[in-house]
């Protein structure tokens, strides 16, 4: 299932590292053939309203990175193919129920 941006990205529409996008002519005329693009980050450069610079990798048909690129596109023309998986918080080990017994240090031997 594909979704257009930004409504599905929350209040700010920020793209996240690992998001997989289809970039077509709708995003920019330079993409007369669509490409698959994996986002590294959204650059915070000043642009025209509705446009964004993205840093990431252009992917081949198998999903392998072909080349790293920075692209200038209209946010509304991007199609989210797959959102990046969000890491789950690490679980911490439960606290021990009994105290740890420590042995007194061995006496030093002198020759």
Image (spheres, rainbow, N blue to C red):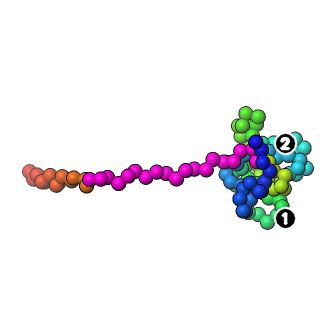
Spatial CA distance of label 1 from label 2 is 23 Å
Residue 34: mark in rendering: 2
- The residue labelled by disc 1 is 49
Residue 74 on image: x %, y % = 84, 56
**Who's the residue at 89% across and 47% down the image?**
25
How crowded is the residue under tag 1: few (<14 C-alpha within 10 Å), some, or many (20+)?
few
Q: Where is residue 67 in the image (x, y as percent from the top left)?
A: 74, 43
Looking at marks 1 and 2 on the same chain, the residue that comes earlier in the sequence is marked by: 2
Residue found at x 35% / y 54%: 95
Q: How crowded is mark 2: few (under 14 residues within 10 Å), some or many (20 or more)?
A: few
Part of the protein shown in magenta: 80-98
Secondary structure beneath disc 2?
Answer: loop
In the image, what residue occupies the spot 91% across and 50% down? 29
| 24 relative position to 99: left or right | right
- 68 above or below 51? above
> In the rendering, which numbered label is found on residue 41?
none
State whether residue 57 appears in this view. Answer: no
Determine the secondary structure under disc 1: loop
Residue at x 72% of width, y 37% of height:
63
Percent of width and height locating residue 28:
88, 51
């Amino acid at each position: 299932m594909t979704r257009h941006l930004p409504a599905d990205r929350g209040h700010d529409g920020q793209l996240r590292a690992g998001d997989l996008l289809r970039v077509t002519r709708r995003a920019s005329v330079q993409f007369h053939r669509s490409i698959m693009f994996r986002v590294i980050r959204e650059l915070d450069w000043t642009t025209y309203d509705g446009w964004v610079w993205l840093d990431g990798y252009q992917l081949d048909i198998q999903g392998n990175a072909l080349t790293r690129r920075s692209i200038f596109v209209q946010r509304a023309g991007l199609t989210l193919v797959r959102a990046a998986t969000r890491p789950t918080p690490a679980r911490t080990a439960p606290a021990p129920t009994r105290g740890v017994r420590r042995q007194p240090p061995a006496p030093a031997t002198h020759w």
